Image (cartoon, rainbow, N blue to C red):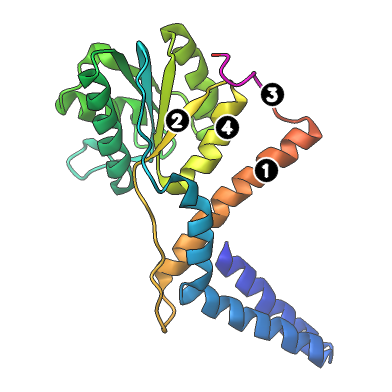
Amino acid sequence: MSMDVLIVLVLLGLALRALKWRRMAAAALWAAVLLFLATGCGLLPTWLLNTLQGPYAQRPAIAWAPRNAIVLLGAGAVRAPDGTVKPTLYANGRINEALAQYRDCKASGNDCKLEVSGGDALHSGESEAAVYGAVLEHLGVPAADLLLEPRSMNTWQNAQFSAPLLRDYGAQRVVLVSSASHLRRAMLYFSHFGIEATPVRGDWLTARPDWWPQSWNFAMSDLALHEYAGVLRYRLYNAMGWNVQATRPGAL
């Protein structure tokens, strides 16, 4: 996304230069240079990520209810050379945190379920729910305590398809586990479908400030911009009446 903007600015500058509009051409080209340096050297992605993740820096203390659901949002699954399907690297933090929350819930003596939400968005041949569920079973979560939601292909559907599962279970406390960078958008969508959740981060992303532009910083900028675009799209669709009718928060 950031590279697309850079390319557009450069092409615009060259086109303006060809049209002899030298001042406007210089402005466009200088804007491209400044954006390249601000992004590559880490200033822009640091600001974007800090603003996006800041509310989820501290893990909250959970007051467990008689019936609780920890919702784990998938982060992709890939087929390994031996034919098995495994969670992606980006899923490890989420899985570990969801497992920790589940164990803490069980230690409280209350009823606890761990819902895994995710379909086969990367076309690995198996749903993320099934793949992550197998990992969690291997780590000691009983199959009876797992709720699998294998249809969703994006965050909006994660919320949409999780709502009836949580309603049927009668969850009184919902803990939503995802990446810190993803939680703002995920919370917005889950709230739209009446799910009042406590957000808990499974991982934390940072830029890599450097005097020399780094490709990592461009990737972090694009990731953050993708999340902001999702929030903006949600608000735009709401204003246009294109989203399905919202459910009252807490009315599972």
Q: Which residue position is annotated with label 4?
A: 189
Identify the image quadrant of the C terminus. top right
Q: Which label lies toward us, 2 or 1?
A: 2
Q: Mark 2 to mark 1: distance in Å? A: 23 Å
Identify the image quadrant of the N terminus. bottom right
Q: Which residue position is annotated with label 1?
A: 233
Amino acid type at circle 1 is Arg
Image coords of residue 87 (percent x, y) = 29, 39
Image coords of residue 198 (percent x, y) = 45, 30
First in residue order: circle 1 vs circle 4: 4
In the image, 108: left or right of 153? Answer: left
Q: Nearer the viewer, residue 93 or 122?
A: 93
Q: Residue at x 43, y 13 (%)?
A: 171
Q: Residues within 10 Å of mark 3 (few under 14, many from 20)?
A: few
Q: Are marks 3 and 4 in contact (CB under 8 Å)?
A: no
Amino acid type at circle 4 is Tyr
Quarter of the image holding residue 32? bottom right
Q: Which residue position is annotated with label 3?
A: 244
Q: Residue at x 72, y 81 (%)?
A: 28
